[in-house]
Amino acid sequence: MEIVEAIRTRKSIRKFKPQPVSKEMLKEILEIAVRAPSAENTQPWEFFVLAGEVLDKVKTDNITKVRNFEIPPDEMAHILVERPKGSVYRNRQIDIAKQLFSLMDIPREDKAKRASWMERGFRYFDAPAAIIIAGETSLPVHGSYLDAGAVMQNICLAALHFGLHTCIENQGVTYSDVIRKHANIPATKRLMAAIAIGYADWDFPANKVQSDREPIEKSVTWCGL
Ligand SMILES: Cc1cc2nc3c(=O)[nH]c(=O)nc-3n(C[C@H](O)[C@H](O)[C@H](O)COP(=O)(O)O)c2cc1C
């Protein structure tokens, strides 16, 4: 797929077909993705690719914790931080939620439907595979996340070349203790994000969402041109 087309058409997918993704394909995607730049070529990323029984166990334990309203481990507290009320960030967050709820026919006051929608991310939107992006805790946080962001976008774009779609998710690493247990990840690794990956189910209403973007005039300051 042509690069600009890939960037323009990538979108977050929130329901996948059960069809498995081969290990070979996932390996190729990661091999392409690690061409991402990183500060001083430190390549501070590590990947834990979950599928099959391991992923099933993670999904089950995540859902149990969500249903029990379990507070995530302290190391993941940053994920729960809310954007300031009235800020553009909060408003954009509300806009995408409204779009998704409208497509899914979830009324604002329907708590049961909202809870069931929220659970989807904790089971990786039924994807047959999930990639956990991790890195050494001994490395500085900001650099690790910057470099992880670059490699994550590469994964999402490279996936398109293979007919696969993705959703980057914080929800997927919220219960880091569950992932650590089933994927055997030591405390010396920071869990930064998850990427659900698989074949998109285009019949699922939420997959039709087209998220908005602000015109670049709002974010660009031209200096000297
Ligand atoms: C770091 C990060 C974390 C995200 N976490 C979630 C998540 O937990 N659940 C979810 O449904 N989407 C999640 N997303 C997807 C965003 O909601 C999505 O990228 C945004 O709404 C723009 O839509 P698009 O990806 O379709 O262009 C996340 C994206 C990023 C970059």
Image (cartoon, helix red, strand yellow):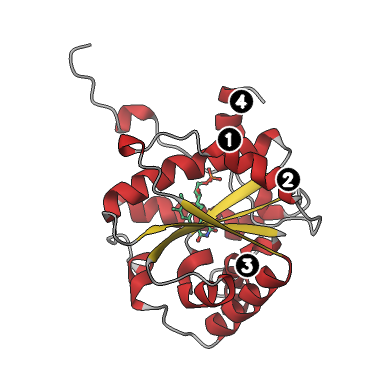
Q: Is residue 78 left or right of residue 50?
A: left
| Contact? badges 1 and 3 (CB < 8 Å) | no
Q: Nearer the viewer, residue 89 or 127?
A: 127
For the residues labelled 3 and 2, the Cα–Cα distance comes to: 27 Å
For the residues labelled 4 and 3, the Cα–Cα distance comes to: 28 Å
For the residues labelled 4 and 2, the Cα–Cα distance comes to: 24 Å
The image shows residue 47, relative to residue 28, as above or below, that is below
Image quadrant in which the C terminus is located: top left
Query: Earlier along the polypeptide chain: callout 4 or callout 1?
Result: 4
- Mark whose residue sits in front, 4 or 2: 2
Evaluate whether residue 195 shows in this view: yes
Identify the secondary structure beneath mark 3: helix
The image shows residue 156, relative to residue 115, as above or below, that is above
| Amino acid on which disc 2 is placed | Glu
What x and y, as percent, mark residue 7? Answer: 55, 31
Q: Nearer the viewer, residue 127 or 52?
A: 52
Q: Residues within 10 Å of mark 1 (few under 14, many from 20)?
A: some
What x and y, as percent, mark residue 32? Answer: 58, 35
Tell me what residue is drawn at x 64 percent, y 73 percent: 59
Which residue is labeled 1 in the image? 32
Ligand 1 under 8 Å from disc 3 Cβ: yes
| Amino acid on which disc 3 is placed | Arg
Identify the secondary structure beneath mark 4: helix
Which residue is labeled 3 in the image? 120
